[in-house]
Amino acid sequence: MQTYRPDKFKTTYGNMQGEALWKFLNETSTIAIMETASYLRRPAIEPLSPFLQHRFPKVRRSAQMRRMIGHMVRQILEDRGFGLYRSNLRITNPANIFAFGSAYHSPDAGL
């Protein structure tokens, strides 16, 4: 597992269970979910919403925490060779804690 580079999220990382979030996002099952969403050209964070709400109840109330999660997801996927496909894709499910997210393409997608 790589080390998270918090950059502008240093305070949020320290105050909002950043280390636990990073570990969760690096679990094999979580990475598989993000990669599947990417294969389907959907935001990688979109299918993570119910799992995040269950394990990290504060995530719904904190916009800064949600932005940090997006920052983490990008680092994880880029480390695995994925590239940005589209940013600011609308997530239409009203139950999802994210309104927008970025979609990524795999290195072998040829895009």
Image: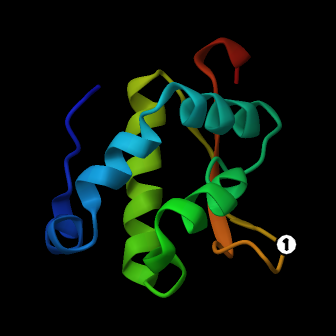
Indicate the quadrant containing the C terminus: top left, top right, bottom left or bottom right.
Answer: top right
The picture places residue 36, in percent across and down from the top left corner, at 74, 31
The picture places residue 24, in percent across and down from the top left corner, at 43, 44
Number of marks in the image?
A: 1
Q: Is residue 87 visible?
A: no
The secondary structure type at the circle numbered 1 is: loop
Q: Which residue is mark 1?
A: 93
54 relative to 14 in the view: left or right: right
Q: Residue at x 27, y 59 (%)?
A: 18
Q: Residue at x 23, y 73 (%)?
A: 12
The picture places residue 79, in percent across and down from the top left corner, at 38, 27
The image quadrant of residue 33 is top right
Q: Residue at x 59, y 30 (%)?
A: 29
The image quadrant of residue 50 is bottom right
The picture places residue 20, in percent across and down from the top left corner, at 31, 52
Indicate the quadrant containing the N terminus: top left, top right, bottom left or bottom right.
Answer: top left
Q: Residue furthest top?
A: 108
Rendered position, 56 above or below 82: below
Answer few, some or many: residues within 10 Å of disc 1's Cα (few below 14, many 20 plus, some between 14 and 19): few
Amino acid on which disc 1 is placed = Asn
Render colour scheme: rainbow
